[in-house]
Image (tube, grey):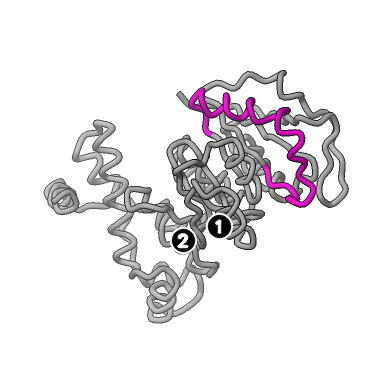
Amino acid sequence: MISNRVIFFIFDSVHLLDLAGAVTVFYESGCCGKKYDLHYVSPYVNPQTSSGLGFTNVEPLNSITVNKNDIVIVAGMEIEKWNRADDHLWILWLQVAAATGATVCSICTAAFALAAAGLLDDQNCTTHWSWTTVLQERYPRIKVVENKLFIKSGRIFTSAGIATGIDMALYLVEEQHGVDFACTVAKDMVVYIRRDGMDVQNSIYLQNRQHINRYVHQVQDYITKHLHHKITIDELASMVFISPRSLTRLFKSSTGITVGQYINSLRQEKAKRLLKENYKTAWVAKECGYQSTAQLRRLVKETYN
């Protein structure tokens, strides 16, 4: 079942962009046709941001009962001002939320809260690069990974901080509504989907996008939406006003693979997904840009062998 409720957990001294970036993703999703029910909860009556801006109209924790279809996002806070004497106000609520099977996410330093609640024990996780060492030292049972935008461990997500909360939120939207819609939301926000997955089983749509070259991102977005067409290097190059040779070189240096490899990977990924959803092979072949059903069967067979 697709959840349309996202609950943002706000500590005192919350970092504004940690919160606002993820909020904007789900808000813009509604503007693009997939509406979310957004709630803001806190163990404090009037929490403040680390930059001094205050919040009103924040719901108390006990007013929200989390269910398994909810998404709970804990925004990062200023660790030096994080009052651990107040743990009794929120730890049980967060533990119960996770126990229901809800998706529980941390942005930036909020990984410390998930770790304090025991939600990251024996799990891979991450946080802002300047806090990874401290997080590992304070919570030796967890496995802190560096140089990742975000990490998924079951239904627990941790992100590296600040703008990476946007990447994680876009991933959650993609999980529920598909990569085409996630790209639409990203375009509406004037950002690029640059997320990479931790494991090979994660969608190829999320891999090879951790670079910052806007021309290559533009090409990747176009490819994603036009897999049913014949796509040529000349066509892609003219779209970003560079030569085919320059695009070939630029794409490989930015993503680590060639344009052809990228197109083939996306086509195989989409074909496998559609076949699992029991669409007819002939339609899948056409939708994914294959010349024949025989070519589709051969490529999918090679992938599995």
Q: Identify residue type, mark 2.
A: Arg
Q: Which residues are magenta?
A: 75-103
Q: Nearer the viewer, residue 225 or 34?
A: 34
Q: Residue 2's x, y, as percent?
A: 48, 27
Res. 63 image quadrant: top right
Q: Residue 42's x, y, as percent?
A: 75, 31
The residue carrying mark 1 is: 192
Q: Nearer the viewer, residue 213 or 123?
A: 123
Q: Residue at x 51, y 75 (%)?
A: 241
Q: Residue 213's x, y, as percent?
A: 53, 70
Q: Nearer the viewer, residue 110 or 88?
A: 88
Q: Secondary structure at mark 1?
A: loop
Q: Identify residue type, mark 1.
A: Tyr
Q: CA distance from mark 1 to mark 2?
A: 9 Å
Crowding around mark 1 (Cα neighbors within 10 Å: few <14, some 14 to 19, many 20+) is many
Instruction: Please state if 294 lies on the left or on the right of 49 as rendered.
Output: left
Q: Is residue 201 magenta?
A: no
Instruction: Please state if 180 lies on the left or on the right of 257 as rendered.
Output: right
Q: Secondary structure at mark 2?
A: loop
Q: Mark 1 near mark 2, Cβ–Cβ under 8 Å?
A: yes
Tag in front: 1 or 2: 2
Q: Residue at x 38, y 76 (%)?
A: 248
Q: Residue 303's x, y, as percent?
A: 19, 52
Crowding around mark 2 (Cα neighbors within 10 Å: few <14, some 14 to 19, many 20+) is many
Q: Residue at x 40, y 79 (%)?
A: 249
Res. 229 image quadrant: bottom left
Q: Which mark is residue 295?
A: none
* As drawn, 96 above or below 288: above
Query: Quick one: label 1 or label 2, which is nearer the N terminus?
Result: 1
